[in-house]
Image (cartoon, rainbow, N blue to C red):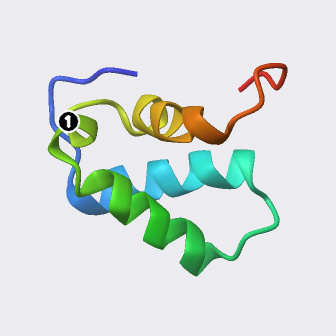
Amino acid sequence: MSTDTPLTDAEWTIRASARLHARWPTISRSQRDEAAAEVAAKPHMRCLEPEDAVAIWLQPIAPSDVPF
């Protein structure tokens, strides 16, 4: 979902947190928001769409047979 207008920090974090919720529905919102902020703080992740950045961030711990 690429747009010409960059996302604000808040928009980026909300979308990243939502993506984390889809993967980890049992963790608290504050934990998801903290993780989303951690991802957003990395310049090489922040230049990506939030959903793509979270997918990359989760790769080291994601089982290969779980689609997301």
Q: Is residue 39 left or right of residue 65?
A: left
Residue 27 appears left or right of 34: right
Residue at point 40% right, 35% down?
Answer: 53
Q: Quadrant of residue 59?
A: top right
Residue 9, picture quadrant? bottom left
Question: Which quarter of the rendering shows the N terminus?
Answer: top left
Residue 10 is situated, as x and y percent measured from the top left of the image, at 30, 63
Residue under the image location 22 percent in, 49 percent down: 42
* Callout 1 amino acid: His
The residue at which mark 1 appears reads as 44
How busy is the neighbourhood of tag 1: few (under 14 within 10 Å), some, or many (20 plus)?
A: few
**Which residue occupies the foreground of this view, 37 or 13?**
37
User: Measuring 23% from the left and 44% from the top, which residue is drawn there?
Assistant: 7
Rendered image quadrant of residue 48? top left
| Residue at x 58% of width, y 75% of height | 31
Locate the C terminus and report the quarter of the image it occupies.
top right
Quick check: 29 left or right of 33?
A: right
List x then y, in percent, for residue 66: 82, 26
Vertical order, 54 against 31 (above or below): above
Q: Secondary structure at mark 1?
A: helix
Position of residue 21 relative to residue 6, above or below, is: below
